[in-house]
Image (tube, rainbow, N blue to C red):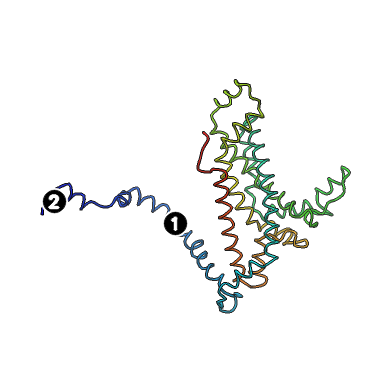
Amino acid sequence: MSISVQQATRVGSKPGWLKPWQKAETWFALLFILPSLIGFTLFYAIPAVRGVFISFTNWDLLTPAKSVGLANYQRLLTDTDFWKAMWVTLTYVVINIFVQTVLAVLIAVLMDRLTKSIVVRGVLILPYLLSNVVVALLWLWMLDPTLGVVNSFLQTIGFERQPFFGAPSQAIATIAGVNVWRHMGYTALLVFAGLQTIPKDVYEAGAIDGATEWHMFWHITLPLLRPVLVFVLVTTIIGSFQVFDTIAITTQGGPAQATRVIMWYIFEFAFQRFNMGYATTISIALFFILILVTIVQMRVLRANESDL
């Protein structure tokens, strides 16, 4: 039985999914991302997979690991200290995200309306360029109850000195305030960049229709900023759940476990109690919590849609 030339060509042709791999651009692209891919594999992917296996063991870092099955995960569900640490973390995240986002949007709008100076943008980004350790030490000294310049100023204007990091009622809010100060300028610049993508004729049309500045902010600026705000909220919330450096320098989980966030709880089990198996279990639980939070944010904020 003979077959037509068209059928023979179809039989001999390669699948469509192979076509991109036949292009030189594809191989050049792979060559450029190869260093990052190697780094990701060595320092992220392989440790993550190994961590899953460690979570099923009891390992003190000194002796060989012993398999315990699902015992660590069963312990996690009934661990009241874990849930307390998660509650402290959630408190920090809410304070940090709310204050940082509101201030960043306010600063970005003021910059867009009043000045677009590069100098102003440079000053805003300066705190973000400092390491977390340096920022934590700086504020630890400034907020010292006895010698801190902030308490000296408060006393000068008639207020009592405040313990800040030393009081259970103030510690987590103080930690959040320090990190808001460091990240606020960077977040404001991201929002400012988003404002530059909004067409100016939209505001002109709103002004012609008699809309006030307040109405245009709520009904034009914020809806059109949604893609940028989604990115800011997702990345900031993920980072906030992993706060550690500031607490390690200032409070170390105290006072009275008021700043014992989930990352510090993991650190305690891994390097103070030498229970790496359970510490890894908590890390995996945090990983899935962050995935769930991210998915919910993406769905609620409609991250894949644009109002432009």
Nearer the N terminus, badge 1 or badge 2?
A: 2
User: What kind of element bears circle 1?
Assistant: helix
- Residue wearing tag 1: 35
Q: Give the farthest residue toward the right.
A: 158
User: Does residue 28 sit above or below 270 in this rendering?
Assistant: above
* Res 115 → quadrant: top right
* Res 246 → quadrant: bottom right
Q: Position of residue 52 (x, y in %)?
A: 53, 67
* Frontmost residue, 57 versus 239: 57
Local crowd size for mark 1, using a 10 Å CA cut-off: few (<14), some (14–19), many (≥20)? few
Q: Give the label, 1 or 2, closer to the camera.
A: 2
Amino acid carrying label 2: it is Ile
Please state if 306 lies on the left or on the right of 72 as rendered.
Answer: left
Please state if 38 lies on the left or on the right of 254 as rendered.
Answer: left
The residue positioned 42% from the left and 56% from the top of the image is 34
* Frontmost residue, 137 versus 42: 42
- Residue wearing tag 2: 3
The residue positioned 54% from the left and 43% from the top of the image is 302
Cα distance between the residues tagged 1 and 2: 48 Å
Q: Position of residue 264 (x, y in %)?
A: 67, 62
* Frontmost residue, 159 versus 290: 290
User: What kind of element bears circle 2?
Assistant: loop
User: Does residue 268 sit above or below 35 in this rendering?
Assistant: below
Q: Position of residue 30 (x, y in %)?
A: 39, 53
Amino acid carrying label 1: it is Pro
Q: Position of residue 89 (x, y in %)?
A: 68, 56
The residue positioned 64% from the left and 70% from the top of the image is 75
